[in-house]
Amino acid sequence: VRAELLAGGRVLDVKVARFTVIRRRWGDFFMCVWAAGGGVNEYVVRQALRVLREHGVDTLTNCPTAPEYAWAAAEEDFSTIPYMTRYFFQGDAPDRIRRPCLTDPKYRRAERKKLLRNARTFAPLDPLAYTLGDECFYSARPVDLCWSKTCLEAYRRYLARQYGSIEALNEEWGTSYRSFDEVEPVTFKEAKGKRLFPQWVDHKCFVDTVFADMMRFARDCIREVDKTARVGFDGPFN
């Protein structure tokens, strides 16, 4: 909105204010492309956005989360799917600890801060959805993870929920633990050499819940800001 203060035909002052409209056009079909780079103040990028819009493209996916990009896309009348974060691990872990560890409270606090900041940027601009990353995976390599303190504690709570009692777990595994606090995961090498496949499979099932819970956590952070947001991730790897 542009307002001018006039006196005797002369412009004394000008004020410009932006406002947004939340439409949530989820029932429509969209022509979507992967977003251009983040240099929205560059002439070429701005021109590319205009040309895409003129040719029927109306949605940019995997958008940079910089505020200037969010507003540039909105000003060209694009719907957006901002790239909020990404969860993946590609390194070695000689100590069997995933870094970052997805159950680490410190890491989650940092993620929450980032997600809230990015959601506050995009929520007023009516994003079509939010992506939690492209090509997400718990680990890209066949390594057994994670033996961190918080993961071990979460794993034992998971087993207690699954089995109900340590006696039931011992019967299934052929072990003689006195409590869930004694339980340790096993690597695939150990499982193969000692025929401990139930232990290994249970831990792998637990890891799936950790990865899924991280996605749930991120979704809930975004929905603290954008109550009706659609949130997911794309291009998952196993």
Image (cartoon, rainbow, N blue to C red):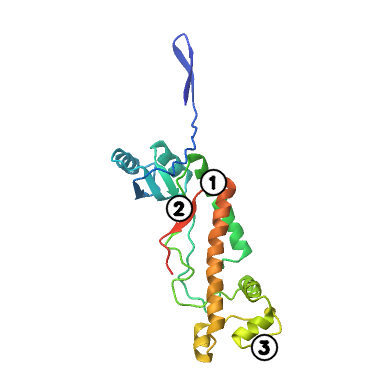
Q: Amino acid at mark 1?
A: Thr
Q: Amino acid at mark 3?
A: Ser
Which residue bears the numbered disc 3? Answer: 176
The answer to which of 199 and 100 lies nearer the viewer is 199
Compared with 140, 218 (above or below) is: above
x and y percentages locating residue 166 in the rendered image: 68, 81
The secondary structure type at the circle numbered 1 is loop
Q: In 3D space, how far apart are the residues under numbered discs 1 and 2 (Cα atoms)?
A: 18 Å
Compared with 60, 137 (above or below) is: below
User: Looking at the figure, which quarter contains the C terminus?
Assistant: bottom left
Q: Residue 202: which quarter of the image?
A: bottom right
Which mark, by number, is residue 83?
2
In the displayed structure image, the side of residue 3 where residue 33 appears, left or right:
left
x and y percentages locating residue 88 in the rendered image: 47, 65
Report crowding for label 1: few under 14, some 14 to 19, many 20 or more residues within 10 A (C-alpha): few
The answer to which of 204 and 88 lies nearer the viewer is 204
The secondary structure type at the circle numbered 2 is loop
Ranked by sequence position, the earlier of labels 1 and 2 is 2
Q: In 3D space, how far apart are the residues under numbered discs 3 and 2 (Cα atoms)?
A: 47 Å
Q: Amino acid at mark 2?
A: Tyr
The secondary structure type at the circle numbered 3 is loop
Which residue bears the numbered disc 1? Answer: 228
Please name the residue shown 54% across and 46% down the image: 228
Residue furthest out toward the bottom: 194
